[in-house]
């Protein structure tokens, strides 16, 4: 929602001030369709050529995600921490082998079904189950598991940020495509030397619209899009870091109620549950 609001404010101020100062909107509007096709067409073509299919699909999926509310809310994190608490509490009470059935078939596990918003997220479920499985096997110590977690988180971070980086490169190239459109407009103008000054002036104005449009699309449309995408992806990484911190605290011998407190502390302040909220949630889940 705020993305659209921001775009509307930017466009309104740019074109509104231009018109208020007596700018000729007719010249801009006449050139806009042709310049838009030239600039966006060239930029999108280069974007397709520069990125793998998986990145292009990820960009489309992430852009769609930006127009909805973020799923990483306080309620979501309460569910994540509640799930981890229930699993660790069961393991502490009945032994690690007691959770083996839950981690081998999480979709039919009462613990995961208790938190459907988390249990339906395959990435979170896989991360939790994989490392609980290692903890159950007992073949790796805490330092080895932590090192493996860090390697997976780093890989996930790099892969998840590829769409945002691709959109950032697209934004960086748009001013250059605006210059290309402007140069072609000047070439067209030079080929029409001999026309009346009014005609040549209109042609030069249309050419300059290309430069303007390339810069505007870069910094008012695509740069904010890439920036917001990166912020959303950081939220996803923070969730995994929260799970890692909680599991590592458990492996170091802390009680489940203390381990989830470790996980709570790494969350961003705007979505971090308070100590009382988490405690109340856990007691309510019991």
Image (cartoon, grey):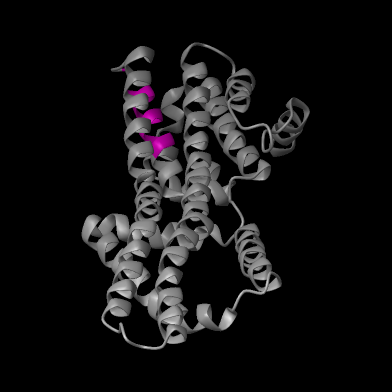
Q: Quadrant of the C terminus?
A: top right
Quadrant of residue 209 within the rendered picture: bottom left
Q: Position of residue 161 (x, y in %)?
A: 39, 44
Image location (x, y in percent) of residue 149: 36, 26
Q: How many marks?
A: 0
Q: Name the main secondary structure of what is drawn in magenta.
A: helix
Q: Is residue 50 magenta?
A: no
The answer to whether residue 141 of the structure is visible from this angle is no
172 w.r.t. 283: above or below: below
Which image quarter: residue 265?
A: top right
> Left of 63 or right of it: where is 273?
right
Quarter containing the N terminus: bottom right
Task: State the residue in front, 110 or 260.
Answer: 260
Residue 143, compared with residue 121, is above or below; it is above
Along the viewing direction, whichever of 31 and 243 lies nearer the viewer: 31
Q: Position of residue 29 (x, y in %)?
A: 52, 81
- Kindly identify the residue that appears in the image at 71 percent across and 31 percent down: 278
User: In the image shown, does 173 or 244 lie closer to the viewer?
Assistant: 173
Q: Is residue 283 above or below residue 94?
A: below
- The residue range painted magenta reads 127-138
Question: Looking at this view, is 221 or 112 the one in front?
Answer: 221
Q: Residue at x 31, y 35 (%)?
A: 155
Residue 261 image point, x, y percent: 63, 22
Q: Residue at x 69, y 33 (%)?
A: 282
Q: Is residue 143 visible?
A: yes
* Left or right: 67 in relation to 56: right
Q: Residue at x 53, y 30 (%)?
A: 242
């Amino acid at each position: 929602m705020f993305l659209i609001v921001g775009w509307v404010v930017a466009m309104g101020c740019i074109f509104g001030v231009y018109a208020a100062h007596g700018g000729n909107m007719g010249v801009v509007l006449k050139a806009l369709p042709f310049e838009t096709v030239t600039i966006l067409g060239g930029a999108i073509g280069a974007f397709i050529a520069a990125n793998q299919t998986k990145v292009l699909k990820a960009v489309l999926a992430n852009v769609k995600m930006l127009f909805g509310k973020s799923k990483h809310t306080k309620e979501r994190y309460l569910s994540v921490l509640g799930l981890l608490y229930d699993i660790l509490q069961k393991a502490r009470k009945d032994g690690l082998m007691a959770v083996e059935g839950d981690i081998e078939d999480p979709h039919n596990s009462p613990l995961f079904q208790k938190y459907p918003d988390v249990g339906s997220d395959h990435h979170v479920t896989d991360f939790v189950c994989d490392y609980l499985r290692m903890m159950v096997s007992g073949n790796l110590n805490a330092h080895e598991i932590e090192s493996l977690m860090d390697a997976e988180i780093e890989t996930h971070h790099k892969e998840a940020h590829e769409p945002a980086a691709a959109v950032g490169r697209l934004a960086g190239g748009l001013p250059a495509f605006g210059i290309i459109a402007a140069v072609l407009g000047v070439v067209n103008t030079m080929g029409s030397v001999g026309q009346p000054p009014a005609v040549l002036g209109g042609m030069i104005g249309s050419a300059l619209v290309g430069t303007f449009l390339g810069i505007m699309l870069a910094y008012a449309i695509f740069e904010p899009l890439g920036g917001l995408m990166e912020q959303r992806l950081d939220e996803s990484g923070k969730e995994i870091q929260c799970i890692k911190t909680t599991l590592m605290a458990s492996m170091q011998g802390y009680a489940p109620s203390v381990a989830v407190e470790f996980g709570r502390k790494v969350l961003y302040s705007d979505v971090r549950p308070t100590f009382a909220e988490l405690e109340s949630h856990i007691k309510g889940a019991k």
